[in-house]
Image: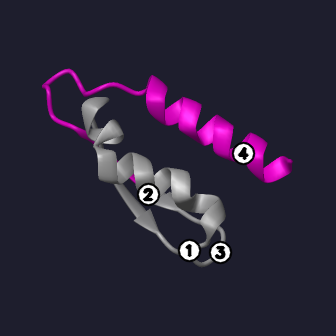
Amino acid sequence: MKNLLIAAALTTGMAASTASADGHANDVTLQLQWVTQAQFAGYYVALDKGFYEAEGLNVTVLAG
């Protein structure tokens, strides 16, 4: 449950971010707490479908 709340908070924070004033994407690095597992699938699906880019974010996901 704790991981779910952390993931929800991170996702909400990322979604609330917008492109900077000059129109360039904000660079965001997401450091996972462990090696890539199914629990992190949402981050990768959002990256693959372009959800972060649509919100003006240039996201890099790093395995723990």
Inspect the image, locate mark 4, and give the three-letter code of the amino acid beneath it: Ile
Q: Residue at 66% x, 38% y: name it.
A: 8
**Quick one: SS at disc 2?**
helix
**What is the x, y in percent for residue 63?**
51, 74
Q: Is label 2 or label 3 in front?
A: 2
Q: Is residue 62 above or below residue 56?
A: below
Which residue position holds label 4?
6
Mark 2 vs 1, N-terminal side: 1
**Quick one: SS at disc 4?**
helix
Q: Residue at 14% x, 26% y: name it.
A: 23
Q: Contact, CB < 8 Å: mark 1 with mark 3?
A: no
Inspect the image, locate mark 3, and give the three-letter code of the amino acid beneath it: Trp
Where are the magenta residues, as a range? Answer: 1-29
Q: CA distance from mark 4 to mark 3?
A: 14 Å
Mark 2 vs 3, N-terminal side: 3
Inspect the image, locate mark 1, and give the three-letter code of the amino acid beneath it: Thr
**What is the x, y in percent for residue 36?**
56, 74
**Quick one: SS at disc 3?**
loop
Dot 1 crowding, Cα within 10 Å, few <14, some 14–19, many 20+: some
Q: Is label 2 or label 4 in front?
A: 2
Q: Residue at 47% x, 35% y: name it.
A: 14
Q: Contact, CB < 8 Å: mark 2 with mark 1?
A: yes
Dot 4 crowding, Cα within 10 Å, few <14, some 14–19, many 20+: few
Q: CA distance from mark 2 to mark 1?
A: 10 Å
Mark 2 vs 4, N-terminal side: 4
Q: CA distance from mark 2 to mark 3?
A: 14 Å
**What is the x, y in percent for residue 52?**
34, 40
The disc label shown at residue 34, or none = 3
Answer left or right for 21 relative to 59. Answer: left
Which residue position holds label 1?
36
Q: Is label 4 or label 1 in front?
A: 1
